[in-house]
Image (cartoon, helix red, strand yellow):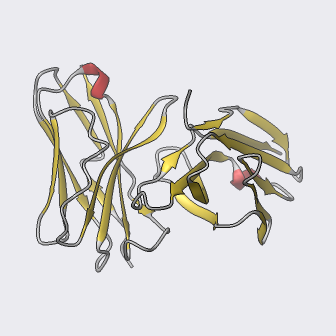
Amino acid sequence: GAGVSQSPSNKVTEKGKDVELRCDPISGHTALYWYRQSLGQGLEFLIYFQGNSAPDKSGLPSDRFSAERTGGSVSTLTIQRTQQEDSAVYLCASSSSPSSDEQYFGPGTRLTVT
Amino acid sequence: QKEVEQDPGPLSVPEGAIVSLNCTYSNSAFQYFMWYRQYSRKGPELLMYTYSSGNKEDGRFTAQVDKSSKYISLFIRDSQPSDSATYLCAMRRTGGGNKLTFGTGTQLKVEL
């Protein structure tokens, strides 16, 4: 079956512009996660959605970052007024339930802020 | 100091070698441990997970956890060129939701 998909695969933007990154989780997966992978930094947790519960936003690095998940499925991560330090690969993952440790990752969106 | 430390490598081994990959952690609240493999320009894929100290084997892969030393390992037997990838350890706290804390990853190259 289809895995987690993300779009766009690559995004180049100018400093100060807003960007939107999209994630389509595996159908039926109730939990959705966003991570950021910077060079030499490993994956950094950003935000977690589970069903209709309030999201865990504890990893968002600043108020320029926000995310929403519509209808319990597709999620959009928005970065406002992008900065060069926002350049990274943004990865989305989903899992079948909050008790599942198996998170399935998408291929990521490579964001470059010039 | 990072909560999870992992040597970034790169690690280069000949085909057929036994590979040992390691992570250390500082927070004893971490109780659930995973290893992910990430090929270039791809998302990570889960290889193994374990919840208890000791060894867990799956084919050519063995995950080892020593909670008393806060040390985890992944062993790959009979390594193949297709094992060339970055290996990430990840761990989760009890009561911390499902967010994972990752190591920086070790880049492995298995040469013919």
Assign the C terminus of chain A to one quadrant of the image.
Answer: top left
- Does B42 sit left or right of A52 as displayed? right
Q: Say which quarter of the image contains residue A81.
A: top left
Q: Nearer the viewer, residue B53 or A48?
A: B53
Q: Say which quarter of the image contains residue A2.
A: bottom left
Residue at x 21% of width, y 22% of height: A83
How far across and down, in percent of the image, does residue B102 sit?
A: 52, 45
- Does B93 sit left or right of B64 as displayed? left
Assign the N terminus of chain A to one quadrant of the image.
Answer: bottom left
How far across and down, in percent of the image, does residue A47 sit?
A: 28, 51
Q: On screen, A93 above or below B103?
A: below
Q: How many marks?
A: 0
How far across and down, in percent of the image, does residue B75 sit?
A: 80, 55
Q: Nearer the viewer, residue A33 or A108?
A: A33
Residue at x 38% of width, y 58% of height: A106
How far across and down, in percent of the image, does residue A88 sit?
A: 36, 33
Residue at x 10% of width, y 33% of height: A18
Q: Say which quarter of the image contains residue A98.
A: bottom left
Q: On screen, B61 above or below B12?
A: below
